[in-house]
Image (spheres, rainbow, N blue to C red):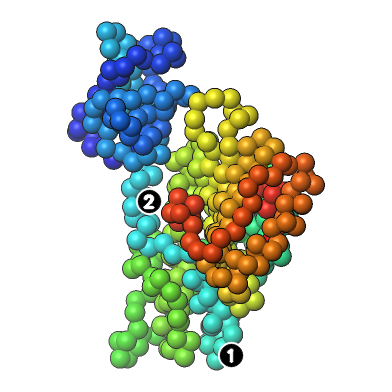
Amino acid sequence: MDISRDAPSPLLRVPQSPPAAASQWRVGQILEAVVRPPGPDGPTLQIGRETIAVRGELQLPAGERVQLQVMAVRPELSLSLVRSPGLDTLAESSRSLLPRQAPISNVATALQAVLNNAQARDALSPPVRAAAEALMASLPGPEAVSRPEGLRAALLNSGLFLENKLAAAVSGTTPPVDAVRGDNKALLANLLNHVFRALTAQPRSSQGGEQPPPNPARPSPPPPPSVRLPVTAEPGQVLTELGRQADAALARIQTLQIGLVAQETQPPWMFEIGVRNNNDTDVLQFLLDKEQTPGEEADKAWTLQLSFDFRELGPLHCKLVLRGTQVSANWWAERQDTAAEVGNQLPLLTERLRELGLEVGGMRCVHGKPPKAADPDRSDGGRLLDERA
């Protein structure tokens, strides 16, 4: 939410009959709300279980969480947007990180190219090489993330929860070494630190062709969308590119963390897990959402969207919907042969889900790309993710 400190807070009026809960509201009370897509009567807000249409200037995207102050309840309910310094700080941080971010698969691909080349690998200083190998070793394989315990471990080590683990270490509930062991964010920071030290220790090129080392405390230029690191380049150039890619992966993790903090306890939540598949590295993207409609909590549907792109399968997407004990899933495979193979395995997936006590609804796989809303740009999904086609 970007509201100028000097600008007056927009006043929002509720011209229709106020919701029943409004009878308990008092002037000056602060309400938590979520911006919903505008309806025929104008901007729409969800306050608790109530969805209300308002009149006034509300130029915020759907899904934005805001605070409202009750300005009047009679003769007409009036609300005012409250400036939230915390959310403003998060927005400013997000704006600085977005141009720099890149998935962890980029730096992993670059590291794999260097480590697979004996000359390039030997040119790395021992600390950089050890940091690179530790990061690569921390990335789970497809078999690991197909199991509940493996998926949980991968999610905990994705970097999103590093600060929580460090806090547990400070309180004494977790050994400090366990807090950072295998954590992607900690390992990326360690790699970037050693790369920076190695670059600053190198003599300057007499031809001036080397780029200055990336400063971890300052934004670096955005990395290329795909990584093709020339491992035969000068060691300084290789280190510089590794530093940029490590910084970009850290920015991506921090961007996801900001999203989780901004959403607090309300979905949607987005997660990413780097997966090492032989010499390739891909990112599993998860988007977990909950139906935001009035009604009993037990009747609301949870939606899990999953996307990945393994070399042998091509881009594959899934949208799984769970409502109580009823589950349905739609798969989209961008390769014809993958769509056919997944389709052949759906009866087995259906049988496994029924063995878990679930009532299986629609289950299909089509060739093509998913609708935009089902393709995360992009939790522990429980036992459902253990039953894979």
Which residue is at a point 30% across and 87% down the rendered structure image?
208
Q: Say whether residue 40 is left or right of residue 250.
A: left
Q: What residue did someone put label 2 on?
A: 94
- Amino acid of disc 2: Ser
Please name whichever residue, 371 or 303, is drawn nearer the observer in this view of the structure: 371
Q: Can you give x and y, in whole percent of width and height, for residue 85 in the image?
A: 34, 36
Pointer 1 with pointer 2, Cβ within 8 A: no
The label number, if any, that marks residue 118 in the structure image: 1
- Amino acid of disc 1: Ala
Q: Is residue 285 above or below residue 327?
A: below
Q: Is residue 262 above or below residue 22?
A: below
Q: Is residue 90 above or below residue 128?
A: above
Please name whichever residue, 28 or 196, is drawn nearer the observer in this view of the structure: 28
Q: Can you give x and y, in whole percent of width and height, for residue 233 in the image?
A: 43, 89
Which residue is at a point 29% across and 8% down the rendered structure image?
74
Q: CA distance from mark 1 to mark 2?
A: 39 Å
**Quarter of the picture holding the C terminus:** bottom right
Q: Nearer the viewer, mark 1 or mark 2?
A: 2
Q: Say whether residue 103 is left or right of residue 280.
A: left
Q: Residues within 10 Å of mark 1 (few under 14, many from 20)?
A: few
Which residue is at a point 63% across and 72% down the rendered structure image?
277
